[in-house]
Image (cartoon, rainbow, N blue to C red):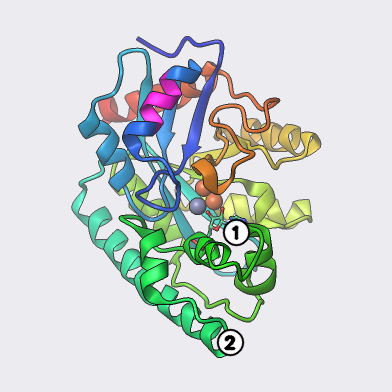
Amino acid sequence: MGCNAPQGIDLHIHSTASDGTLSAGEILSLACKLGLGAISITDHDTTAGAREALAAGIPASLEFLTGIEISAGPPGSVSVDGSLHILGYGLQIDHPQLRRELSRLQQARRQRLPQMLERLRRLGFDLTWEEVRREVGRGQPGRPHLARGLLKKGIVSSMDEAFERFLASGRPAYVEKYRLPADQAIALIRQAGGIAVLAHPYLLRIRDRQRFETLVAGLKDAGLEGIEVFYPEHPPAETSYYSRLAERLGLVKTGGTDFHGSLKPKLQMGSADGAFFVPCSIYDELSSRLAGRSEGS
Ligand code: AMP
Ligand code: ZN
Ligand code: FE
Ligand code: FE
């Protein structure tokens, strides 16, 4: 069938299975309403969102790829201040080893939030576990759920304030989370038949290109197959740089908004602030690489 939509695609979407505010079913409906040609649900450390979408049934007008976004630790020699996230596309969501590793990451997430809550209590803010649990719902516990709790309680007046005052790395309520080393995250995605992609490279906050390319080369040796070139927070010059780098290294280019529903209210599915666009050709290349793989294996 292929993707053939002037509105393009969105390969980076979070559902209520992690920290988005729309369910997988609502995401499918919205994608259709917006006229998108292809989407992937890429929840943090879980494939439950993708599973739910498949169970709901993918509308005929939409192409769908299973997905995940794994929070990874830096591999060996390169230090990373920013977010090192590995996206996986087209994976078998019930692959046993994938399930096993993800349940470890999920357990670590469940343990982390109460520790952050305890820190907030010691700072004098009496947000309760009940209040936070209501925000988490069926999702993967994350800092946005604490932020929403703080916001509803009137302790902060915006999500940004919650992160800047308390929750961001280095702020007083921050607690480190267990991360799968990036090479292992990549291997896991490949074992499950998926394509591993470096998410939002600009958010790694490595501004030195040589250091960045050393990191990417190392990840490629570990099995990385793509770079998320198109991302709303990428400055235009960086987008062209990532695009050239992907071509030079033979990596696929992907793109998406990192849609989270009303958690990031200014960010619309497919189009972000309105000016963002990822063409169908990006989906076609990714899906033909995936198709080639299943024929080969
Ligand atoms: P965690 O999974 O607990 O590490 O939390 C990461 C999530 O927090 C990601 O989905 C980010 O999009 C989100 N996040 C980080 N900074 C902010 C912010 N200033 N406002 C809203 N969400 C944020
Ligand atoms: Zn998120
Ligand atoms: Fe991310
Ligand atoms: Fe994301």
What amino acid is at disc 1?
Ser
Which residue in the protein does label 1 denote? 83
Q: Residue at x 41, y 60 (%)?
A: 135
- Residue 281 placement, left or right of 295: right
Quarter of the rendered structure image containing ligand 1: bottom right
Label drawn at residue 128: none
Q: Nearer the viewer, residue 194 or 139?
A: 139
The magenta region covers 27-32
- Residue 218 placement, left or right of 22: right
Quarter of the figure that contains the N terminus: top left
What amino acid is at disc 2?
Gly
Q: Nearer the viewer, residue 31 or 233?
A: 31
Q: Label 1 CB, ligand 3: below 8 Å?
A: yes
The overriding secondary structure of the stretch rendered in magenta is helix
Q: Is residue 194 visible?
A: yes
Quadrant housing residue 133: bottom left
Which residue in the protein does label 2 denote? 124
